[in-house]
Image (cartoon, rainbow, N blue to C red):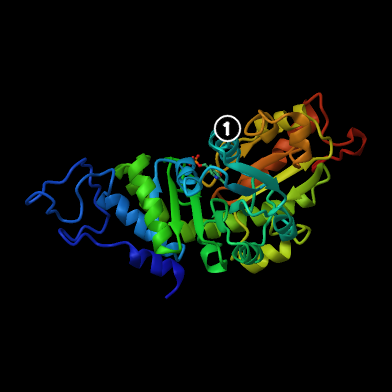
């Protein structure tokens, strides 16, 4: 059975009524027949049928044994870090999601957990950074916003040989494109706010664990710390996941066409997309992913903050907003938005240049999206004080 069919088959029909849509159990508690005698549920922080269904669906999608749904992606990440103790060390990918960076450095370092950041696009950097204190290796692949790729299988082998756990933040690829547990990782986390939910209407996080004992530990933290996903938000996430494979197909196709369009554009300096043969880790991405995802970043030949600012303010279909993974296309300017708090020198060194623009390519008709980018390039060239290209080379109806 194909993945998409398997997914839809795995969403249960309500045994009580035959409802084909998963019921929303909007209840805090469950009446007991006698003290301690219940139907498997006693209190919704501990367990809730709607949330349990979501957890089962995502655990199956990631081929893990246990799923745990949280109130946000960051709460999911937080639950994984709680596996560590004071004195332990994390090795994390250097262009890690900003919220995870803040959690690791401003919260967990207070408790004596140390963090080393390395460029994970070459596994040797992880190998070289491992010490006897290292307990957890934290990978994102593709990364945000420069779409770097890490070889999950190679890193998992290094981790196993050194007794470390590997956790992959699989938000950007989604299980439709990449299943880290099948490549040797121990834990997967998702910001389900992005591709799993898919409609920019819910904040949610999921952890999926391969080993049942480790899974029980995460479920313990979920209940003990309490950042659980609400029943309605669990339902919204299930509702989104039903069309995951269909949406991802369109995201991939649109993003690939846009990356190729941008790569041939005279005003564009670099295009960051793992589906381009020019990507330094194209071969690894091709090996471990079934497609290359919906996020494309690019920088301009004239690397100026103002120019990128004008660009992101002049698109019509691409809406200016943080976040990604929804059906509607979004555009953002990391230097002024998600990465603004990072000092300019450090930000540039991480590959986030002043003019870097990130697209979360939606599922609209790709022709319309390319036309939107093209009209923006033209508008900037004709009406802006800052020129996208050399004005002397501008021809009527050409891009520049
Ligand atoms: C958005 C995001 C998160 C955080 O998820 P929230 O749901 O916003 O808490 C974590 N990792 C990645 C890669 C993300 O894009």
Compared to residue 333, the image places residue 158 above or below, namely below
Nearest the camera: 29 or 247? 29
Residue 378 visible from this viewpoint: no
Q: Residue at x 13, y 51 (%)?
A: 36
Compared to residue 268, the image places residue 392 above or below, namely above
Give the percent coordinates (x, y) of residue 23. 24, 51
Q: Quadrant of the C terminus?
A: top right
Figure label count: 1
Nearest the camera: 382 or 243? 243
Compared to residue 6, the image places residue 124 above or below, namely above
Does 193 sit left or right of 339 as displayed? left
* Residue at the limit of the structure toward the bottom, as seen here: 1
Q: Residue at x 60, y 47 (%)?
A: 89
Does 278 sit left or right of 245 as displayed? right
Nearest the camera: 181 or 35? 35
Other residues around mark 1 within 10 Å, as few (<14) / some (14–19) / many (≥20): few
Residue 6 visible from this viewpoint: yes
Q: Residue at x 45, y 66 (%)?
A: 63
Give the percent coordinates (x, y) of residue 387. 83, 30
Nearest the camera: 83 or 234? 83
Give the percent coordinates (x, y) of residue 103. 55, 37
Q: Quadrant of the N terminus?
A: bottom left
- Which of the 4 quarters of the picture holds residue 357? top right
Residue identified by numbered label 1: 106
């Amino acid at each position: 059975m194909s993945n998409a069919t398997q997914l839809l088959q795995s969403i249960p029909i309500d045994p009580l009524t035959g409802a084909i849509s998963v019921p929303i159990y909007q209840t805090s508690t469950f009446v007991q027949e006698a003290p301690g005698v219940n139907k498997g549920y006693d209190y919704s922080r501990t367990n809730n049928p709607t949330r349990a269904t979501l957890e089962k669906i995502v655990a199956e999608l990631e081929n893990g044994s246990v799923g745990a749904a949280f109130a946000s992606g960051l709460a999911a990440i937080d639950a994984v870090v709680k596996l560590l103790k004071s004195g332990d060390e994390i090795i994390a990918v250097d262009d890690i999601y900003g919220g995870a960076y803040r959690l690791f450095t401003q919260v967990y370092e207070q408790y004596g957990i140390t963090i080393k950041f390395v460029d994970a696009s070459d596994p040797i950097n992880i190998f070289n950074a491992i010490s006897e204190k290292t307990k957890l290796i934290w990978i994102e692949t593709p990364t945000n916003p420069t779409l770097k790729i890490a070889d999950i299988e190679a890193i998992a082998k290094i981790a196993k040989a050194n007794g470390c756990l590997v956790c992959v933040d699989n938000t950007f690829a989604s299980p439709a494109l990449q299943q880290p547990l099948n490549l040797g990782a121990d834990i997967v986390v998702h910001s389900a706010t992005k591709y799993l939910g898919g409609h920019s209407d819910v904040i949610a996080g999921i952890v999926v664990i391969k080993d049942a004992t480790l899974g029980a530990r995460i479920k313990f933290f979920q209940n003990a710390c309490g950042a659980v996903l609400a029943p309605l938000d669990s339902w919204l996430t299930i509702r989104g996941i039903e069309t995951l494979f269909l949406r991802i197909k369109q995201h991939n196709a649109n993003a690939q066409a846009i990356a190729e369009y941008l790569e041939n554009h005279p005003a564009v300096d670099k295009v960051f997309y793992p589906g381009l043969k020019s990507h330094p880790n194209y071969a690894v991405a091709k090996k471990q992913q079934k497609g290359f995802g919906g996020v494309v970043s690019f920088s301009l030949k004239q690397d100026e903050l103002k120019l990128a600012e004008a660009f992101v303010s002049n698109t019509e279909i691409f809406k200016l907003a943080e976040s990604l993974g929804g059906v509607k296309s979004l555009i953002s300017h990391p230097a002024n938005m998600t990465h603004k708090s990072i000092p300019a020198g450090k930000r540039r060194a991480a590959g986030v240049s002043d003019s870097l623009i990130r697209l979360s390519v939606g599922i609209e008709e790709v022709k319309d999206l390319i036309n939107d980018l093209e009209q923006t390039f033209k508008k900037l060239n004709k009406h802006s004080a800052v020129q996208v290209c050399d004005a002397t080379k501008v021809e009527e109806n050409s891009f520049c």
